[in-house]
Image: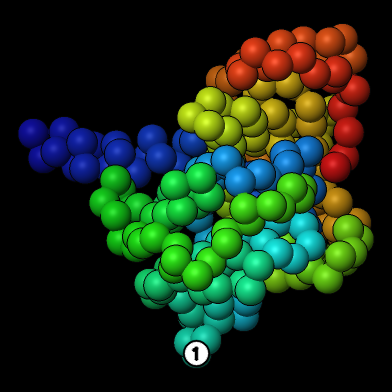
Amino acid sequence: MKRLLAFALLLPGALAAADAYLESDGSQAILTDCIVTPETRLVVDFQMTALEGQARIFGVVIDPSAEFYVDGTLPDGGNFSFGFGDTWTKSSVVPADLDRHVATLDIDKRCYSLTTDGAIVLSGTFPPTVEALRTAHYPLAVFAKVPGGSRSVFGGVSKMRLYSLRVYEGGTLRHEYLPRLADGKACLCDRQTGKTFFDANKSPRPLLFGGKSNVKFPKCDGKARTCASGKRFASRGPRSG
């Protein structure tokens, strides 16, 4: 009986550990093909592996930006915080840790939240003075952001594991970026389109793929397809951001 109880207690953690993830050691970053708009909602399942300085979990290329980051203001730690709007307004904060979380930034509804094991640990709404990306249409990066208008220099690169990044537009799932091994290389793959995205920071060290994945990705064969929203797009084959 004691062995069964011990197994039951370990099972949830074991299942969580089995989930596929893409891990950055703090030197890699990925630039996606997602264009953030005023109707975008970002949902990110992640886990920091270290807390060092300012680290971006995700960030929109070029200011004004929407992002989620560790602000690094505490010794050997920091706070989780969202940034949004033309003036880079900061959200409320919560102490950063190495637990697994789900972060949601809803630009359309002007709100944000951070959950741990299904419990909300941080939430709020944008201040009324913030025009949170109401007119912005910029690409989205993960493990970092690209500040100052350059798409080649990433700032705040983070040490973390990314389990999933889902992008909704007007309530419709537009992108579902998940960890994948493609030609033996770790990358993110959009389950909606089959496009793959590798390290765009030109790090000498590769991203790491961990856990297990049973996800069946569509083949990116360059043909036109219909995405979840019903709009047509042309797939251009595998790319590296």
Residue at 64%, 31% (x, y): give it. Answer: 175
The residue lying furthest to the front in this view is 129
Residue 166: image location, x then y, percent: 56, 36
Q: Neighbour class for label 1 at 10 Å: few (<14), some, many (≥20)?
A: few
User: Does 51 sit left or right of 238 as displayed?
Assistant: left
Residue 99: image location, x then y, percent: 41, 59
Tag 1 residue: 75
Query: How is the protein colored in the picture?
Result: rainbow
**Placement of the C terminus among the 4 image quadrants:** top right
Residue at 58%, 42% (x, y): give it. Answer: 40
User: Does 15 sit left or right of 68 as displayed?
Assistant: left
Work out whether residue 194 or residue 59 is closer to the camera in this orientation and state it.
Answer: 59
User: Does 238 sit left or right of 83 as displayed?
Assistant: right
SS at badge 1 = loop
Work out whether residue 235 or residue 233 is closer to the camera in this orientation and state it.
Answer: 233
Q: Is residue 33 above or below residue 27?
A: above
Does the image show residue 38? yes
**Placement of the N terminus among the 4 image quadrants:** top left
